[in-house]
Amino acid sequence: MMKTLISAFALALAAPAALLAQSTTAEDAEAFVQTQANQVIETLTELQSGQTDLASVRQDFRNRIDELADVDRISNFVLGRYRRTASEDELAAFRTAFRNYAIGVYESELSAYAGQQLDVTGSVTRNPGDYIVRSRVYGGPEGEEFEVNWRILDTNGDLKAVDVEVLGVWLAQTQREQILSVIGDNGGNVSAATEMLRNREPGQDS
């Protein structure tokens, strides 16, 4: 369940200090995380019990990802300074590969994490419209419990998850470092990172 919930967000975003037209509260951000988690948990429970099949669960997630995460904003962040030098075609190809990779990881891990639970335990407001929501994931077959922190941003009243911290590691920063390293090693060629993501999609040969 932990990987199921975070694999689509295994990326990050450095948010600006001030965001416009904030209308949400920390309680709204907490409710957003809990609601989204409950929806995934319910679907996984149905999968585990045989009430639905894996194909239906995969489609449910594909329909949900844009509600959950700001993929374009995350893509821009992980590209760093190279976003300004890439062509529109290169950016579009990278974003598509990035999205497919995230969904592919989710799908490959999906069936292994049914039966776990997530409870929101509190939050911190970093700036207006910029929240860290704390939660715990528990109830797996091995009795493990994890703390998971969610970076939630509000842009004009629309809440999105943009980063996740698991076991003390902000997953997004790790992805950014890997992608920037690949681009740097290939002379600033964003297409090199696009190809890397395509090769890492589950079911693809590296």
Image: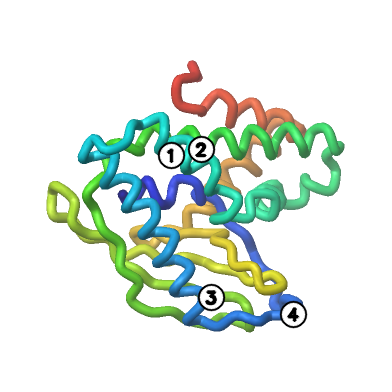
In the image shown, does 79 or 7 lie closer to the viewer? 7
**Crowding at mark 4 (Cα within 10 Å: few <14, some 14-19, many 20+):** few
Name which residue type carries label 1: Tyr
Q: Dots 2 and 1: beta carbons under 8 Å?
A: yes
Disc 3 on helix, strand or loop? strand
Can residue 188 be seen here? no
Q: CA distance from mark 1 to mark 3?
A: 24 Å
**Crowding at mark 2 (Cα within 10 Å: few <14, some 14-19, many 20+):** many
Residue most toward the top? 205
Identify the mark nearer the N-term, 1 or 3: 1
For disc 2, the marked residue is: 103
Q: Dots 4 and 2: beta carbons under 8 Å?
A: no
Identify the mark nearer the N-term, 3 or 4: 4
Task: Give the label, 3 or 4, closer to the camera.
Answer: 4
For disc 3, the marked residue is: 131
Give the residue at x 69% y 50%. Answer: 72
Give the residue at x 67% y 48%. Answer: 75
Q: Dots 1 and 3: beta carbons under 8 Å?
A: no
Can residue 130 be seen here? yes
Identify the mark nearer the N-term, 4 or 1: 4
Name which residue type carries label 4: Ala
For disc 4, the marked residue is: 21
**Crowding at mark 3 (Cα within 10 Å: few <14, some 14-19, many 20+):** many
Give the residue at x 35% y 37%. Answer: 109
Vertical comparison of 68 with 26: above or below: above
